[in-house]
Image: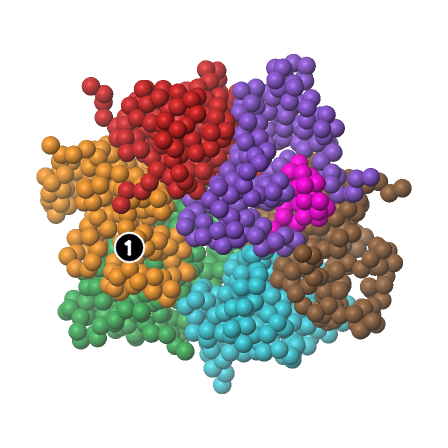
Chain colours: A orange, B red, C purple, D brown, E cyan, F green
Amino acid sequence: MSAPISRFPVPDINAVPDDIRQMMLAVQEKAGFIPNVFLALAHRPAEFRAFFAYHDALMLKETGSLTKADREMIVTATSAKNGCLYCVVAHGALLRIYAKQPLVADQVAVNHLKADITPRQKAMLDFAVKVCLRSQDVGDADYAALRMHGFDDEDIWDIAAITAFFGLSNRMANVVSMRPNDEFFLMGRVPRK
Amino acid sequence: MSAPISRFPVPDINAVPDDIRQMMLAVQEKAGFIPNVFLALAHRPAEFRAFFAYHDALMLKETGSLTKADREMIVTATSAKNGCLYCVVAHGALLRIYAKQPLVADQVAVNHLKADITPRQKAMLDFAVKVCLRSQDVGDADYAALRMHGFDDEDIWDIAAITAFFGLSNRMANVVSMRPNDEFFLMGRVPRK
Amino acid sequence: MSAPISRFPVPDINAVPDDIRQMMLAVQEKAGFIPNVFLALAHRPAEFRAFFAYHDALMLKETGSLTKADREMIVTATSAKNGCLYCVVAHGALLRIYAKQPLVADQVAVNHLKADITPRQKAMLDFAVKVCLRSQDVGDADYAALRMHGFDDEDIWDIAAITAFFGLSNRMANVVSMRPNDEFFLMGRVPRK
Amino acid sequence: MSAPISRFPVPDINAVPDDIRQMMLAVQEKAGFIPNVFLALAHRPAEFRAFFAYHDALMLKETGSLTKADREMIVTATSAKNGCLYCVVAHGALLRIYAKQPLVADQVAVNHLKADITPRQKAMLDFAVKVCLRSQDVGDADYAALRMHGFDDEDIWDIAAITAFFGLSNRMANVVSMRPNDEFFLMGRVPRK
Amino acid sequence: MSAPISRFPVPDINAVPDDIRQMMLAVQEKAGFIPNVFLALAHRPAEFRAFFAYHDALMLKETGSLTKADREMIVTATSAKNGCLYCVVAHGALLRIYAKQPLVADQVAVNHLKADITPRQKAMLDFAVKVCLRSQDVGDADYAALRMHGFDDEDIWDIAAITAFFGLSNRMANVVSMRPNDEFFLMGRVPRK
Amino acid sequence: MSAPISRFPVPDINAVPDDIRQMMLAVQEKAGFIPNVFLALAHRPAEFRAFFAYHDALMLKETGSLTKADREMIVTATSAKNGCLYCVVAHGALLRIYAKQPLVADQVAVNHLKADITPRQKAMLDFAVKVCLRSQDVGDADYAALRMHGFDDEDIWDIAAITAFFGLSNRMANVVSMRPNDEFFLMGRVPRK
């Protein structure tokens, strides 16, 4: 009953443009497998390049006060609101690894109000969920609430942009029925030996 | 940052009535630990007894066409809609074990439409989610859709009753902030040796 | 055009197990008729027993500050949110009788914010409605709001548990199309002579 | 704890313009009391006159296939969706009287899908509820569904207009906290001698 | 692909009752064309008369602190929430003209929180939107918020009544697919020479 | 009362990286002004580049059956659902120009079901709105409905990706309160001389 990676054709790694293949090989080298989002989105090379350029600008940036775990926590919580299986599973795995907390991804995916997170992280996710579900209502009070927890305006942009970018990702994954790699489900749950 | 089992006092196992202690010891014998729902609900012995009598009547019954995995799948999917951390994690574990599928619980918790389940299970969850979220709209068409997948009326009662009973459980767990035991998160994810 | 009691078979009172028949006869003795919930749920004796054990643990308990009228008011208000005809009509009748107020049940069924109730009862129903519709969002602020009106934690458990239990009842009644006895509609509306 | 008729000043019957007083006296003559909507809206005579002219154009018209009971049923069902205490209680009373059915008003106020009504009336209320809650989605399929039950276009206008007009009434009653007269609650529940 | 004015028959101006024709000619004299709402509603003369009597009582009244622009702003913002093409376009035009602001109508139609309006107008629209979408929740806090911006109770009635009346209008326009005159789209966007 | 372009600092065109300045000058050359989205997003050059690369991949592509007007129609309709003032106004302008229809943008922004569009465009927008608001429910039936109107799978990807990308854009614009240039409001409404 296992579903395909995508409703759309998935190109062979040998058939994709060189730069995309290099990206695939690099992530395979690091993770041990090629995450399906690389394969599914390679169906459209120009969109693929823009997608990962955006992703890297937000998720690999070295400035600001959001940790890598914070960023993956935003992705996990908001992707759950959008019912996006791929992103909850894949980014939940990254969250477990970066946070070194095997339980936190499942917690924020179900209900961040019950998760083992700090008040600052709760405020961060409250805002991310609002940007995800009703960004039209965001206003001064939301900025003020975040500043009370030490977030500055650049952090607020980061939270919003990560939420917005993965909202795009969630919609594409939902529409193409993108399947998370089986490997993600277990990553970060058991201590590495 | 780990939260307590419940907002309410949790009785010592030695302080609970005999019949309740026997139930706790029996589940501990079987599972290796006492699930927190037993400890949290023991705060009210009379409700505890009714809760587990109801639970057993629905989840341990030997009649009908719903498998144990089907029943836990209903609990996992509808508890996710209610944002109930305890039930998604605890019953997701049972679902993985009964279904012998390490991925299915995470799948139905995020979006049952993308899960590796049968069309019959999809119809079952479509109905369960409707009972969970807008039971006032249930009618003839819902019965007809389920019968097309081979469910009889007793199965339909079972799906509805499991959903309704765990809706009760979800609300109590949400209100008392019931914490799932850490053990549940990993159960059924790796093959038993 | 009068509908049957339930979509499911309704057992003859002479065909049900002795303990269930005794319960039916007792309520008939007291009320003058057998409420249809007894007949409809007797289709499943084990569930019947658990249901009424739970019901009695919550609705007949002698401790806590909730009056019988308060409890029926919670049931009436939340059952209306769930669109449950049986419970609004049957428990609305009990509310009128316990509160000795012929208008209050119709008021809370339509909009508790416009009902002739105390600020304390309004706070109680605000919380009950939240538990009914979005228990995942319940948190510290809800507890604090209730304590300001003199409710202690055990009262809060009571409000939540009554709401949760009748949420189960509402879903079963909706799914089986449980019909309220005609007698309930008029009970408590005119002074007993 | 009984609330006033309206948050706004209620004019004395002797202080209102003649034509409005005549209307009040006429309804008092017929009903035995002055419904509070007359008193509350008399605060604004020009709006009062337009309101009742609109009301009479829709509710007293002699053409079309909607019975008086049908029209009051539309008002009762849609006013319940808008949480309007005044209209559910007052028009529920009229519905009971016109339909000569003591139970039907409570039924459609809670859930018209479970009411003792005809399939034609169910289709009528399905449409009225859609006009009430999401008129922006009304289209060809809604017209077709109604025509299948024998409604012609003028009937469809009537259903829509009654729903729309009482949506206005519901909003005014909610904002001014219009209180239904106590007399309405019991009207039509017991046979007239 | 241009749609008709209404799903229902539109009477010829020479065939309508005299008083209605006079109203049509008067508005044509002033605006240069007959707004389609006059033609579409003339299908039902009695309702037409009540509709415009109500309209004029609210929109032409000389008392209270709401400007003509404020009133049209309420209509534009709430009609957008109801997805009513006719009213957004026609009253957006009037708003542009009365406010002498060519941008404000498009702003409040999309999101009044981002519009070039005063804090007082924002409070007015916050309330109007609440009356439009969930009038059942209106209460003391809403009155208090408006009074803080200098609105008195008569102003509050005006805001509510305008919202409620155009809620009626929106539903009728949606159901009959009332088409805005092409002229409205451009009115007030360019300075009159 | 005119608001700034963005809550965040807007860089001077002379202070932005060369490639970004070239893009700004090119659009200024073409449109006569620099759309504020270029200025607001230039606050983050890396994100700016990814944003416009993505934008161009979707909106400037030469393949597929979607016209430029179709694409801007998708943006206008879904941005309205997200309450995004910038995108409704800016892309509404482009829609008017590409479609050579001065009315269509206001129509689809308020309610695409009432717009002067083809059945094929209506199906396209039905799908886009679903991807915008509840992409988790997209499935086979949605693909089938689009294929009936002649869309192939690559078109479906395009509709989804445009909706998803502008969902990102909408959220960023809402959070930073991005202000549409005044010029957009009138563009395409009057024939060019």
Element carrying mark 1: helix
Asked whether E4 or D43 is in front, the reply is D43
The quadrant of the picture occupied by the N terminus of chain B is top left
Could you tell me what secondary structure mostly forms the magenta stretch? Answer: helix
The residue singled out by tag 1 in the image is A120
- The residue at 89%/42% (across/down) is D193
When asked about the image quadrant of residue C32, the answer is top right
Let me know if residue C70 appears in the view.
yes
**Which stretch appears magenta?**
C89-113
Determine if the magenta segment contains residue B14.
no
- The percent position of residue D67, horizontal first and vertical second, equals 77, 46
Q: Which chain carries label 1?
A: A
Give left or right: position of B50 versus D55. Answer: left
Residue E34 vertical placement versus D158 (above, below): below
- The percent position of residue E87, horizontal first and vertical second, equals 56, 65
The quadrant of the picture occupied by the C terminus of chain B is top left
